[in-house]
């Protein structure tokens, strides 16, 4: 079975002029990810210091994955969903910048231990012998859609739980585990963020403030969050016709494509420059040369009214 789309709501074929510009924007973002993929192959100067170096690489990988997803969406004029991706990208950028200036390694280890405790919660819900699993079974029974289903059970749950238990009981992490419990008790057993350990910031807003990026949070992150949570469904989407009757815009509008591309570019350049300065000082000249060439090629981004003047009718 195949349903024909309503062309006025979901146009599958783009105007050739729009398509050409979107392809260029997409290529800009692809180039950012391409350069980032090279960074991923470089060995950081603290690579041999232990597990504390791992979280930065993981967050960088995640950041690049989301920028790569934006490049795909921009190419096909699916711009609105990029807001949620930008939100996650910004969070990953904050995490990386927070971890960079920590010679003690405690921040990186905090993430590893926090993640282990979070993983433990999930594992318990996948263990048919646990109270958490039995409670989940009862919750399924009360749900109209899930009442005939049962929660998933992991076949190798015992091994997974044992491995997690060994990590949390390891002597080399004892100080970090103790700090996790101290932080959790301080917040009266509410869920905590990994970056809150060792008296760190309590939330993303505080994190962005101490990193000097609060304007991004106030102006952009809040709007990205409302988009991610599905609450920004009126502004910029509903308009009125000549009779004053409300009209809903089609999806896949190219509006804000240049803004999304520009934000991805600016955040990435900021991240790369700080990361390379902290972890790959020997690569600074190479990065400056790449950025100079990239900036020259992306001058089109400075033409802010490109879409709104030519293609908004």
Image (tube, rainbow, N blue to C red):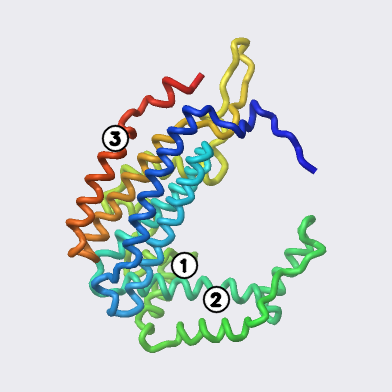
- Check the image and report above or below for 208 versus 261: below
For marks 2 and 3, the one nearer the N-term is: 2
The dot on residue 299 is: 3
**Secondary element at tag 2:** helix
Q: Position of residue 302 (x, y in %)?
A: 30, 32
With respect to residue 248, does 127 lie above or below? below
Q: Position of residue 266 (x, y in %)?
A: 31, 44
Query: Residue 88's mark?
Result: none
Residue 117 percent location from the top left of the image: 49, 74
Which numbered mark, 2 or 3, is in the foreground of this view?
Answer: 3
Point out the image quarter for the N terminus.
Answer: top right
Q: Residue at x 41, y 56 (%)?
A: 64
Q: Secondary structure at mark 1?
A: loop
**Disc sitting over residue 120 in the figure:** 2
Q: CA distance from mark 2 to mark 1?
A: 20 Å
Decide which of 42, 125 is in the foreground and name it: 42
Can you tell which quarter of the image residue 42 is in?
A: bottom left
Residue where numbered disc 1 is placed: 188
* Mark 2 crowd level (few <14, some 14–19, many ≥20, 10 Å Cα): some
Disc 3 to disc 1: CB gap under 8 Å: no
Q: CA distance from mark 3 to mark 1?
A: 51 Å
- Give me the residue at 79% from left, 55% from top: 144
Residue at horizontal 48%, vertical 75%? 116
Work out whether mark 2 precedes mark 1 in sequence or the reverse, and give the earlier one.
2
Measure how far apart labels 2 and 3 are at the Cα level: 48 Å
Residue in the foreground of this view, choosing between 224 and 269 = 269
């Amino acid at each position: 079975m195949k349903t024909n789309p309503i062309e006025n709501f979901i146009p599958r074929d783009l105007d050739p002029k729009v398509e050409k510009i979107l392809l260029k924007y997409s290529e800009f973002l692809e180039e950012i990810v391409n350069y980032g993929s090279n960074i991923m192959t470089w060995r950081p100067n603290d690579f041999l210091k232990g597990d504390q170096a791992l979280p930065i690489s993981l967050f960088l990988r995640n950041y690049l994955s989301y920028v790569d997803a934006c490049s795909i969406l921009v190419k096909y004029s699916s711009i609105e969903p990029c807001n949620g991706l930008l939100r996650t990208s910004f969070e990953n950028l904050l995490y990386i910048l927070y971890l960079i200036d920590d010679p003690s390694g405690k921040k990186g280890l905090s993430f590893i231990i926090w993640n282990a405790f979070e993983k433990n919660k999930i594992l318990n819900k996948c263990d048919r012998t646990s109270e958490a699993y039995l409670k989940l079974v009862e919750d399924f029974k009360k749900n109209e859609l899930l009442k005939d289903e049962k929660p998933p059970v992991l076949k190798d749950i015992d091994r997974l739980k044992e491995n997690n238990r060994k990590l949390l009981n390891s002597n080399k992490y004892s100080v970090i585990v103790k700090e996790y419990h101290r932080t959790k008790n301080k917040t009266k057993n509410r869920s905590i963020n990994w970056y809150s350990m060792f008296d760190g910031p309590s939330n993303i807003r505080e994190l962005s403030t101490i990193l000097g990026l609060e304007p991004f949070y106030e102006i952009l992150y809040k709007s990205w969050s409302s988009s991610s949570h599905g609450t920004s469904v009126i502004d910029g989407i509903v308009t009125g016709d000549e009779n004053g009757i409300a009209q809903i815009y089609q999806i896949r509008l190219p509006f804000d494509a240049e803004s999304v591309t520009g934000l991805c570019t600016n955040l990435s350049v900021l991240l790369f420059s700080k990361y390379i300065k902290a972890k790959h000082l020997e690569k600074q000249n190479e990065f400056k040369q790449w950025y100079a060439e990239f900036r020259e090629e992306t001058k089109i981004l400075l033409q802010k009214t490109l879409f709104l003047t030519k293609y908004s009718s």
